[in-house]
Amino acid sequence: RGSRTVRLLGSGQQSTTLDLVVYGSHVAPGPITLTATLSPAPDPNCPLSFTIAGFPDFYPDHIAWTYQTLTNPSRYVQTATFEAPPGHYTSEVSFGHCMGLTASSDSAAFDVTGDSTPPTGTVVINDGSATTNDINVTVHLSASDASGITKVAIASTTQPGTETWILFDPLTTIQMPLAKNQADGLYNVMVRWRDGAANWSDPVVATVTLDQTPPTVEAPAQLFVAGSSISSGQITVNVPVDATDNLTGVASLGLNQKTNSGAWKNVPVAAPESLTETTVDRFLTPGNLYNFRARATDVATNTSAWAVGQAVNLKKEQESSARIHFAGGWKKVSSSTYWGGAAKKSSTAGATASISFTGTSIAWVGRTGPDRGKVQILIDGKALPGSIDLYSATAQTKRVVWAYSWATKGTHTVTIKVLGTSGRPTVDLDAFVTAE
C-alpha cells in the first residue's frame, strides 16, 4: 500500500454529434424554429454551415439567428427563428473537418400549411397623372386579404430587376422620392403586400414620368405673307411659335406682342393639332416698332422662360419713295384701288425697281390680274431661281405678291426686273414694306 500516480498517454480523435430539430407551429406564418446542436462544442473558428431552402423568390423577411456555447455538457447551439408562408422547406446543417474534429451533417424537411392566397392591391401615384415635375411623390396604396396585411415592400426604379425593396408596416399613403439622382425619365413604383400568413403578393406597378425640364422655345420672328392683302392700311405678319419638349410634350404656348415702347400684351394662340409648332398671323401697321416673345408649358407643367424675338420697324416705301430706284421706263398711275392712291407700272422688258435696306424681311405690294406679267427677283445682284407670275383670273390690288426673309438682320438690295411677258407684259409696284 502507498500513494501512486497513474498517467495515461495516447492519441485519438474526439467524436462529434450534430442534431437538427424543428420546433414551432407548422401553420403559416409559424413561427418556425430550427435548432442545430453540435456536441461537444468545437473551437470558435469552426462554424456551422446552415441553409434553409423553400422560400419564395421574393422573401425579404427577417430570420433571427442566435448562437450559444454551453457547458455541462459541452455543446454549441445555433438557432434560426422565422415566419414562413405555406410550402415545403428543407434545412441542412453541416460541420466540416476542423481542428481534428470529424465532419458531420444533418437535415430536416417540414411543411407549412394554411392560407396560400397572397393579397391583392392597387397603386396610384399622386392623383394618377402620368407625369410630374416633382421628384417627391405621394403613393396611394390599397390592398386586401382574408388574413390581413402585415407588411408592405416598396421600390422605385427606371429598370425593373434592379430595384431595392424597403419594408414598411401597413400603410395607405407614403411620400417618397422617385430617385436619388433626380434624373428625368420614366419611373416604376413597385409595391408588394404581405398577409397574415406570410404570403407576399406579386409586384403591382404604377408608372410616372419625371420631367423637371421646361420646353425649349425659339425666339419668334416676323415674316411677311405672300398672297395676303393690305387691309385698312395693315399688312399681315406671320409669327411662328416653335417649342419642343422631348419627354412629356408641349401642353400650351404663349405669345406676347409689344408695340413701340408699350407694355407686353397677350396674343391668343389657338391650340393646333401639334403644339410643338404653330403660327399666328398679326395685322400690323407700318410706321411702328414691333416685337414678340414666346414661351411654352409642357404636360408636366414646367414653363419656359420667355424667348424674346428681334424688335423690327415696319417701314412702308410707297412708289414715290426716294429709297426706290426705277430704271427702264416706269409710269405713275393713280387710282383709289392702290395703297396710298398711286403706283408705278411698266411694260418694258428689262425695266427694274430696286431698294436697299438693312433688315430681316421685305414684301412687295402690287397688283395681279389677267393682264399682268412675270418678273425676275434679284437679291444682292443674284437672281433667284424661277420667276414671279402676277397672273390671276380677276384683278386684285393691294396684294403682297412676293415676300422674303433672312435669319439675321443684314443689308440687302432687292431688285424687280420686268420680263415683258408676251400678251401681258405689265407689272405694278404699289409699295415695298421692310422689317428693319
Image (tube, rainbow, N blue to C red):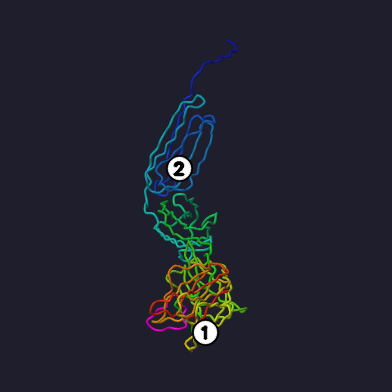
Residue at the spot 42% in from the left edge and 39% down from the top edge: 91
Q: Residue furthest top?
A: 1
Q: Nearer the viewer, residue 309 or 160?
A: 309
Q: Which residue is tagged 1? A: 233
Question: In the picture shown, does residue 106 fall above or below 132?
Answer: above
| Mark 2–mark 1 distance (CA, rounded to whole Å) | 95 Å
User: Residue 305 in the image: x percent, y percent?
Assistant: 57, 68
The amino acid pointed to by label 2 is: Thr
Q: Look at discs 2 and 1 and give the one toward the viewer.
A: 1
As helix, strand or loop, the secondary structure at mark 2 comes to strand
Q: Secondary structure at mark 1?
A: loop
Magenta stretch encompasses residue 325: no
Q: Which residues are magenta?
A: 390-400
Which residue is disc 2 drawn over? 33
Task: Locate the N terminus and report the quarter of the image it occupies.
Answer: top right
Residue placed farthest to the bottom in the image? 336
- Residue 217: numbered disc: none
> Which of the image's four quarters has the C terminus?
bottom right
Residue that extends furthest to the right in the rendered view of this protein: 261
